[in-house]
Every structure is written in structure tokens, then in C-alpha cells.
Amino acid sequence: MHPPEDQLRAGHLPADWVRQMPPGTDLRKVVIVQEAPRNYTGPIVLTLVITAGSVVVLLVLAFVVQLIVASVVAVLSATCGVGITLNRTAKSKRSLRK
């Protein structure tokens, strides 16, 4: 037994379809239209584009925030004398003497 798709591709009409056709229909001129299988390329590409776009927007936003903070600190240090100092904790020095 062949699957229904193979029978339809070969041009064989199922018996229940033949019964549904009006009398006097020429079965040699009947065209069977099948739905194409679903293509998943579009949704996958759309998901990748949305993800990449979100990452790019977040990186640009982080860069802009960094520039704004740096310019604010530069203006404040030039006008008001306010600055940011970064202190690194010093490691304990070992004595070179034994």
C-alpha cells in the first residue's frame, strides 16, 4: 500500500473524492492542489535578527552611558574640582631581608 501523498502525486483520486464530484465531471481534468510543507527558514532568521539587534542596541546603550558618565566627570572635575579616584588595595610588602 502506498501512502496517500504518493497516490495523489501519481494522479490517483481517492474513492471518497470521486463520490463528492458532481456527475459528468471528467476525472482526467481534475487538478489536485496540495498545501506546500511549512518552511521554517523565515521564523528562524527573524529570531536571529531580533536577537542580534537586541544585543547591538544594548552594547550601544552601554557605550553611550559610559560616554555620558565620562563627560560628566570631566566637566565636574574641571569646574568644581570634583573627581573620582580609584584606590587599589596594596598588598602587604614582604621584607627582602632574611
Image: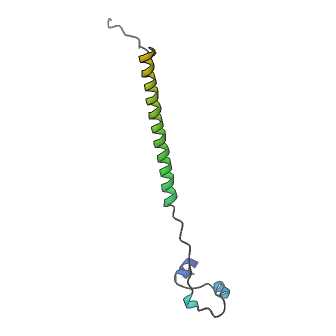
**To which quarter of the image does residue 73 belong?**
top left
The image shows residue 58 at horizontal and vertical percentages of 49, 39
**To which quarter of the image does residue 7 belong?**
bottom right
Quarter of the image where the C terminus is located:
top left
Residue at 50% x, 59% y is 42
Quarter of the image where the N terminus is located:
bottom right
Q: Is residue 63 above or below residue 48?
A: above
Q: Please give left or right for residue 85 compared with residue 3 in the image.
A: left
Residue 86 seen in the figure: no
Given the current orientation, which residue lies at the most extreme left position? 97
Residue at 48% x, 36% y is 61
The image shows residue 53 at horizontal and vertical percentages of 47, 46
The colour scheme applied to this rendered structure is: rainbow
Foreground residue, 89 or 83?
A: 83
Foreground residue, 49 or 97?
A: 49
Q: Is residue 11 above or below residue 61?
A: below
Residue at 51% x, 52% y is 47
Q: Please give left or right for residue 14 compared with residue 58 in the image.
A: right
